[in-house]
Image (spheres, helix red, strand yellow):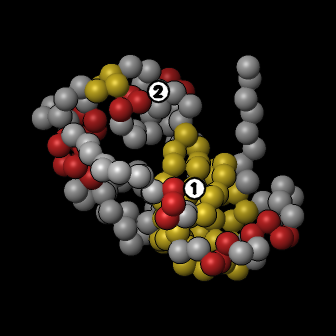
Amino acid sequence: MDVQLEPIGYVVGGRTEPVDDDWGDVEATIVLEDRLLDADAIVGLDEFSHLEVVYFFHLVEPEDVTRGARRPRGNPDWPEVGILAQRAKARPNRIGVSRCELIDVDGFKLRVRGLDAFDGTPVLDIKPFMVEFAPRGPVYQPAWASDLMRHYW
């Protein structure tokens, strides 16, 4: 099966250099494609505080994709784990998912904070974050993941 996706928008502003940490205060704008969406596609979006954004890691070359295991960020202190056990950008379909704060909606321009995507990143989908979609029950992760995320936001 061949799956083809067309971006519904692009990230404008924010970071232009590939830096992995300190995303919490980074602001950017998602500019939606008006040729793909009706004007009322965003009605009610401004009533949500956070969005889940699905995007394409466009700066990762296909030959750089990891299909097996590796050490996160190449850190020798962390275990070698499969690409599906981490959130690295060099994954098979180069798809990223991020939760960010929605600051403002101005037509098809969505101002966000904490979106870990670079200027020019193609946006594939946007969903409002709803509390009921947060994990049910206890959440756990390995110590290396907590270490990796310590300065991410």
Taking depth in this image into account, of 99 and 116 the one nearest to the observer is 99
* Left or right relative to 101: residue 104: right
Q: If you read the primary sequence from the N terminus, does the residue marked by circle 2 or circle 1 appear first?
A: 1
Q: Name the residue under label 2.
A: 65
Give whichever of 92, 63 is nearer the camera.
92
Left or right: 2, with 11 as reference point: right
Residue at coordinates 26% horizontally, 43% vertically from top-left? 141
As shown in the figure, which amino acid type bears the numbered disc 1?
A: Val
Report crowding for label 2: few under 14, some 14 to 19, many 20 or more residues within 10 A (C-alpha): some
Q: Which mark is residue 53?
A: 1
Q: Specify whether residue 98 is in view.
A: yes
Few, some or many C-alpha atoms within 10 Å of disc 1 (few <14, some 14-19, many ≥20)? Answer: many
Q: Which residue occupies 22% across, 56% down?
A: 150
Q: Where is residue 115 in the image (x, y as percent from the top left)?
A: 48, 61
Query: Going 17% across and 43% down the picture, which residue do you hit?
Result: 143
Task: State left or right for residue 19 relative to residue 47.
Answer: left
